[in-house]
Amino acid sequence: MLHTHPVNPDTPFISRPQASLRAQALRLLQIEAASDKAAQVHALQAADWPLDVDEILPEPPHLPGRPERPQLVHPSRLKTRAVGTLEGRAGLIHALTHIEANAINLALDMMWRFAGMPADFYLDWWRVAQEEALHFHLLQQHLLSLGFAYGDFPAHDGLWDMAERTKVDVLARLALVPRTLEARGLDATPAVRNRLVSVGDLAGAAILDIILRDEIGHVAIGNRWYRYLCAQRVLDPVATYAHLAQQFQAPILKGPFNLQARRAAGFTENELAALHTEPNALPLPPVH
């Protein structure tokens, strides 16, 4: 005899046979444990789920899911530790691990929140989520090898704060998260890598080589879809970026800039020139 069971509306999306890939992204975003979230993102295969680009998913409360630790504080309250000490190096690796945990959330949020984009948009951001999950895993394992765990140090919430501000418009999100905040990593990563090499942490430096390679591709995806929307809305990309940066109070970065990586990620010469001419530029803050 065949037994059937009613679907509980509180059951996670993954248990529903007709769940879409974008619904899966929302389910994953709600997972609290970062290591569990990264593992499930890594294991899930996009081809196993239908992709409904027009599906409107209601926003649940308390996004994103995250663990009780690390404690989130204002950036001014974070200590800068000497990387030559074990605790200082662990603090640096922890900060990078936290960035990658946030990056997973940002990619998943991009997928579920913004309906009506081409299918390739969602598949691009799914690939980003999986690569960010790999970065998190590599850094978390390296942190454990130093005798520390994710959550042992406080952290700040700058990346997700901008995601919250820009959730009203996919164009603003693309302009100010992948093309601004995540692009900061293209500038900062070589210097951080050199700091690790200077104290003999070649394993950590090798992880940053992987991250920089992949992040160039992630920023390029942001550039691709930002320009797609600018063309669709008949907007000038450079002028529109300046307007959005002002409207949403995005930080304006001061060099040095990794121009080679930014060019590889698809920034135009006009955009690179604008980096050097913005008034009241804020310096690139240190990674805590």
Image (tube, rainbow, N blue to C red):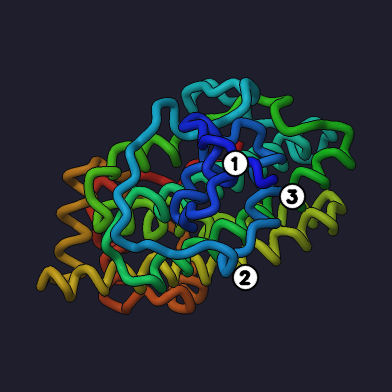
Residue tagged by mark 2? Answer: 213
| Callout 2 crowding tier (Cα within 10 Å): few <14, some 14–19, many ≥20 | few
Tell me which residue sits at (44%, 36%) in the image. 158
Q: Earlier in the sequence, mark 3 or mark 1?
A: 1
* Left or right side of 170 for 119: right
Give the residue displayed 79% in from the left and 57% down from the top.
197
Q: Is residue 246 above or below residue 235?
A: above
Would residue 64 be found to the left or right of residue 37 on screen? Answer: left
Marks 2 & 3, CB-CB < 8 Å contact:
no
Q: Quadrant of the N terminus?
A: top right
Asked if residue 58 is positioned above or below residue 211 in the image, the reply reads above
Look at label 1 and name its amino acid: Thr
Q: Which residue is mark 3?
A: 137
User: As shown in the figure, which amino acid type bears the numbered disc 3?
Assistant: His
Mark 2 vs mark 1, CA separation in Å: 49 Å
Give the residue displayed 62% in from the left and 21% down from the top.
68
Q: Which residue is mark 1?
A: 4
251, 99: nearer the viewer = 99
